[in-house]
Image (spheres, coloured by chain):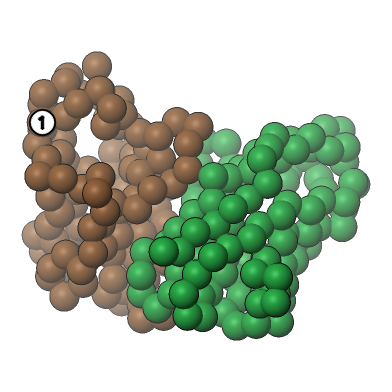
């Protein structure tokens, strides 16, 4: 069964540094999402992306965050200047119209 | 806006016990309802879904019925196993809106 793949599985970064999290969605999917899960808390929506533009974003997704689909397969989340509170598990998901979202295994981001 | 409320965990059960994890929701329109499971150290996996009232989703012995009259989607399993130990998330969306998750319920099954 096709999968959403995320790399790296664990990223350790110094506070203030930029970080890019990478995702390869399922190949025929058109809708892409990023969510995050701070340790022990609920999964929170960050941003959705369709037709090469952001379709919706949450309050969490401020100017420090950006997303990009640089080619036909990758979908990236960039955090420009990381803060301690950005430490979380970040999940990428993809879907087709009106079908459930499929999630990757996540990237654990640790900010020191 | 849309929201999901799950029972607080953790839930600890003996092997072969009956499991219920309650989930209720608030939504505009006609949402689709989901249960996702997160095993230790892993990502979120879709467990089951229901897209309209009275639909029953089922997978791996788990079941949940979409009850519009009570706005509920409780997860049940007749006989849990140690391998079912995980965190279970109830979630919903309408159309292609983002998923809204409950806080998650941690299940521990002991032999």
Q: Please identify the quadrant where the C terminus of chain B is shown.
A: top right
The answer to which quarter of the image holds residue A14 is top left
Q: Nearer the viewer, residue B60 or A44?
A: A44
Q: Is residue A102 visible?
A: no
Badge 1 sits on which subunit?
A: A
User: In the image, residue B56 lies at what x, y percent?
Assistant: 71, 76
Colour seen for chain B: green
Q: Is residue A30 visible?
A: yes
User: In the image, residue B85 lies at what x, y percent?
Assistant: 70, 40
Vertical comparison of B31 with B104: above or below: below
Residue under circle 1? A81
The residue shown at (36%, 59%) is: A93
The residue shown at (13%, 68%) is: A53
Q: Nearer the viewer, residue B15 or A80?
A: A80
User: In the image, residue A22 lies at what x, y percent?
Assistant: 23, 48
Q: Please identify the quadrant where the N terminus of chain B is shown.
A: bottom left
Q: Secondary structure at mark 1?
A: loop
User: In the image, residue B7 lies at what x, y percent?
Assistant: 68, 46
Colour seen for chain A: brown
Q: Is residue B103 left or right of residue B70?
A: left
Badge 1 crowding class, 10 Å Cα cut-off, few under 14, some 14 to 19, many 20 or more, is: some
């Amino acid at each position: 069964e096709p999968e959403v793949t995320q790399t790296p599985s664990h990223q350790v970064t110094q506070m203030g540094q930029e970080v890019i999290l990478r995702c390869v969605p399922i190949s025929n999917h058109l809708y892409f999402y990023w969510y995050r899960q701070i340790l022990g808390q609920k999964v929170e929506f960050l941003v959705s992306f369709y037709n090469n533009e952001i379709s919706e974003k949450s309050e969490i997704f401020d100017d420090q965050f950006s997303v990009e689909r640089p080619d036909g397969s990758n979908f990236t989340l960039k955090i420009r200047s990381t803060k301690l509170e950005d430490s979380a598990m970040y999940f990428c998901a993809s879907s087709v119209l009106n079908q459930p979202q499929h999630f990757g295994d996540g990237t654990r981001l640790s900010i020191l | 806006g849309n929201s999901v409320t799950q029972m607080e965990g953790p839930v600890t059960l003996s092997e072969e016990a009956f499991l219920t994890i309650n989930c209720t929701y608030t939504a505009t329109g006609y949402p689709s309802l989901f249960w996702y499971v997160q095993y230790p150290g892993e990502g979120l996996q879709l467990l089951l879904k229901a897209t309209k009232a009275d639909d029953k989703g089922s997978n791996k012995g788990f079941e949940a019925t979409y009850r519009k009259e009570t706005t509920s989607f409780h997860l049940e399993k007749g006989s849990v196993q140690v391998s079912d130990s995980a965190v279970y998330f109830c979630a919903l969306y309408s159309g292609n809106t983002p998923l809204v998750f409950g806080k998650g319920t941690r299940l521990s099954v002991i032999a």
